[in-house]
Image (tube, grey):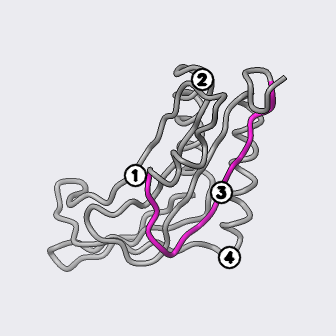
Amino acid sequence: MPTNGPRSPGKAVFAGISDTPIDADTAWDAVESEHTGAVVTFGGIVRNHDGGREVLKLTYSAHPSAPARMVELVDEVASRHPGTRLWAAHRVGELHIGDAALVAAAAAAHRGAAFDACRDLVETVKAHVPVWKEQFFADGEVEWVGSA
């Protein structure tokens, strides 16, 4: 049976926390193979507003356990989605409007499986990786939001 065919276990190709820019092209290239007929990518992008307020920038901080937790979670998601190849990275540090904060990709033989795996991957990372967001608003206020 081919590696990462529809009945083979899912595979975590990459999982990490990055202090340098991340992008969907890197994720796509990493998960795509001759066995995949669908690649789905997700980019969580820093937007210029939140709750009706203008956002100037964000700073993400991660607990020291975040890199290991990220690997663990991506492996867990892969185990729930046979035949998929998964990639996920979360940024830390100062990010500006338009920067990617979270990038994820899932590849599978068929689109339904790729969409399902990518959504599960994003929701799992957002719910369980110990990363916190500090939002800087145009009115001078600052707000902390927990990602995990």
State the extent of the magenta-drawn residues as a range. Answer: 8-24
User: Which residue position is annotated with label 2?
Assistant: 113
The answer to whether 99 appears left or right of 89 in the picture is left
The answer to whether 76 appears left or right of 1 in the picture is left
The answer to whether 110 appears left or right of 7 in the picture is left
User: Which residue position is annotated with label 1?
Assistant: 44
Residue drawn at (77%, 35%) of the image: 79
Instruction: Using the image, tell me which numbered label, if any, was put on residue 15.
Output: 3
The crowding category of the residue bearing disc 4, from other C-alpha atoms within 10 Å (few below 14, some 14 to 19, many at least 20), is few
- Secondary structure beneath dot 4 equals loop
The quarter of the picture where the C terminus appears is bottom right
State how many labels appear. 4
Q: CA distance from mark 4 to mark 2?
A: 32 Å
Task: Check contact, mark 3 vs mark 1: CB within 8 A.
Answer: no
From what the image shows, is residue 82 above or below residue 97?
Answer: above
The crowding category of the residue bearing disc 2, from other C-alpha atoms within 10 Å (few below 14, some 14 to 19, many at least 20), is many
In the image, is residue 16 part of the stretch drawn in magenta? yes
User: Which residue position is annotated with label 4?
Assistant: 64
